[in-house]
Amino acid sequence: MIPHIISLSRPLNVVIGGLSVLIAASISAQFTLDIKVLLAILAAALITAAANIINDIFDIEIDKINKPERVLAAGLISVKSARIAFLVFNITGLVAAFSGGWDLFFIAFFAELLLYFYSYYFKRTILMGNIVVSLITGLAFIFGAAAVDDWKVGIVPAIFAFLFHLGRELIKDLQDVDGDLANEAVTFPGQFGKKASLILINLIFAFLSAFLTVPYFINLYSVAYLYVVIPGVSIVLVFVSVLLWFKNDVLWLGKISMLLKVDMFIGLIAIFIGSRI
């Protein structure tokens, strides 16, 4: 059962969540790897795991159509076991945040509320679900910056994360459109179609690609940041934006979504290098 619960939590997402907090904390001049930062990383990882589990619980019927290989959809563990795992990760994540201080607890609690209502309701609405989950992703950077009592340094990476995930979430909605329609989930692709969705994704990624250079020109990050973010993120976003018009079946949308997930690490590396060199 434990391997299935680990799979249900989506370990790569958990790593990205914890790493986002660490990067956000480390770009502050006040950074030290103290107990508060470690608790923030732990809390983010646990809450990310809980979020992935509750999302799959609510999406079990949709996943039976779109992603039947997933743990719950395949019947590898029961919904009851998944709910218990969700509660364990959820509560321990909040305890870890509370142990780090009231500021971390309030951010974590707010994120938990958003995550629950996202899975329960917002995910099945036009754009609102995409916006909410992207906002939560951005909050990870505010959370990490708050761990070193310097929340302002988390604002720029939070904006990056918000836009990056907003585009990626729309790609995932395109991939899942058949299952969403079958379960009466009203998403942007389901309501407005593939072409409108691709145009919106292109606009988001174009704006993000342009905005990625801003931190250098306002002297927030060094030129080393540009050396990583332009080839590693901006060019990838342009490539993906073009590719989507030619390769947009379910298989390719899954591959593109995974490429973007991996590219998040490049973005995190760019921010870290740009703030440190």
Image (spheres, rainbow, N blue to C red):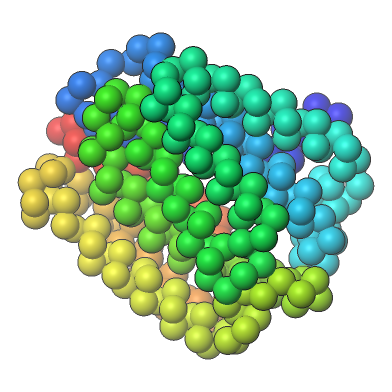
Image quadrant where one finds the C terminus: top left
Snapshot quadrant of residue 48? top right
Q: Is residue 193 left or right of residue 142?
A: right
The residue positioned 84% from the left and 47% from the top of the image is 72
Image quadrant where one finds the N terminus: top right
| Residue 272 seen from this side | no
State the residue lying farthest toward the top. 35
Q: Is residue 223 above or below residue 190?
A: above
Residue 232 on image: x %, y %: 33, 54
Residue 24 on image: x %, y %: 32, 34
Snapshot quadrant of residue 214? bottom left
256 vs 20, nearest the viewer:
20
The residue positioned 47% from the left and 55% from the top of the image is 134
245 vs 18, nearest the viewer:
18
Q: Is residue 183 left or right of residue 167?
A: right
The residue positioned 65% from the left and 31% from the top of the image is 90
Q: Is residue 183 above or below residue 85?
A: below
Residue 35 on image: x %, y %: 41, 11
> What is the number of callouts on the image?
0
Residue 21 on image: x %, y %: 40, 32
The residue positioned 49% from the left and 80% from the top of the image is 198
| Residue 123 seen from this side | yes
